[in-house]
Amino acid sequence: MMIYLIKRNLRLFFRDKASVFFSMLGVIIIIGLYVLFLGNMISSMVDHLPGMADSARFLMDSWIMGGVVAVASITTCMGAFGIMVDDRANHIIKDFMVAPVKRWQLVLSYIASSVIIGIIMSIFTFLLAEVYIIIYGGSFVSFTALIKILGLIILSVSASSALVFFITTFVRSQNAFGTASTILGTVIGFLTGIYIPIGSLPNAVQIAIKFFPVSHAAVLMRQIMMNEAVSLNHLPMEVKEALGVHFIAFDDVMPNWSHILVLIGTLLVFYSLALWAVSRKKGRI
């Protein structure tokens, strides 16, 4: 039964072209701003460094696109959970409750479909990003980097799905969900240090960014993709800190395992909180 529910959710999402578009709107805005305004400005941050004259654009395209793929992991999950909000607002969930469908199957079908949609759309975003990088003189990532990116996409989408699921347990109307999606799409570029590199922001804002789980996925994605352009060992530490390629915590560089731990912790904590919130609603989701 749960398989049929997941298939239903996938069909509903991909059939609604507006839903697909708006789930990608944050990504489209970021790429548009980068192409029109930010590309040359951000590239100028590294093109003066020794040996960077020929690879500055490739490096910074990889930087921005790494952040874009991380952003897609949460915005597309948000769009996917719109199906649950619609079912709730239109009282379709009540129909499921009187059907031979267990409550946990229904909840799990929403979660599973959001993860599947998030992975599909994030991979699609990554492929578009690679096309953009190649057009501007870069090259496709190596096979090893590709495997790492796919694994990171799965982890990032799973963590983002948990966070979004927790948020949507408190959303009771389509208007409220639309407002939440708009706010997320607006601020996501700041929360991942894309519109303005994290090193240019006040310390208080930097701390807030470091508490946002998806920013940790962006750090790892940037490291993988930028390393395909230039070895990160050739970049000064202050440049890596300014661009958010490394996060500093307690006066030391956060190791990669700590970023992974943040994502896993987000997945476990917010799914647990969301399921607890759902269980308290006495038959409602």
Image (tube, rainbow, N blue to C red):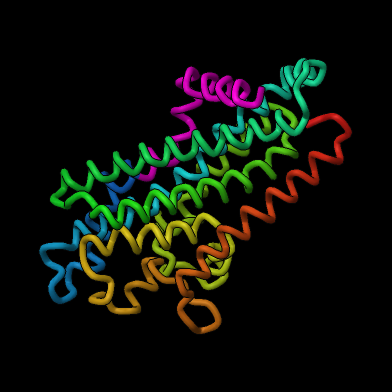
In-image side of 198 versus 269 (left or right):
left
The image shows residue 167, relative to residue 178, as above or below, that is below
In-image side of 237 versus 121 (left or right):
left
How many numbered badges does the structure rendering display?
0
Query: Between 152 and 206, which is closer to the camera in this rendering?
Result: 152
Furthest-bottom residue in view?
251
Q: Quadrant of the C terminus?
A: top right
Furthest-right residue in view?
282
The image shows residue 141, relative to residue 110, as above or below, that is below
Magenta stretch: includes residue 88: no
Which residue is painted at 77% across and 29% down in the image? 103
The image shows residue 55, relative to residue 14, as above or below, that is below
**Could you tell me residue 19's position as x and y percent?**
50, 25
Query: Between 239 and 100, which is closer to the camera in this rendering?
Result: 100
Task: Magenta stretch: give its range.
Answer: 1-30
**Could you tell me residue 86's position as x and y percent?**
66, 23
Which residue is painted at 48% across and 55% down in the image? 190
Which residue is painted at 66% across and 55% down in the image? 268
Which residue is painted at 13% across and 73% down in the image? 51
The image shows residue 256, relative to residue 85, as above or below, that is below
In-image side of 224 versus 88 (left or right):
left
Magenta stretch: includes residue 16: yes
In-image side of 117 versus 167 (left or right):
left
Q: Quadrant of the N terminus?
A: top right
Which is the main secondary structure of the residues drawn in magenta? Answer: helix
Q: Quadrant of residue 60?
A: bottom left
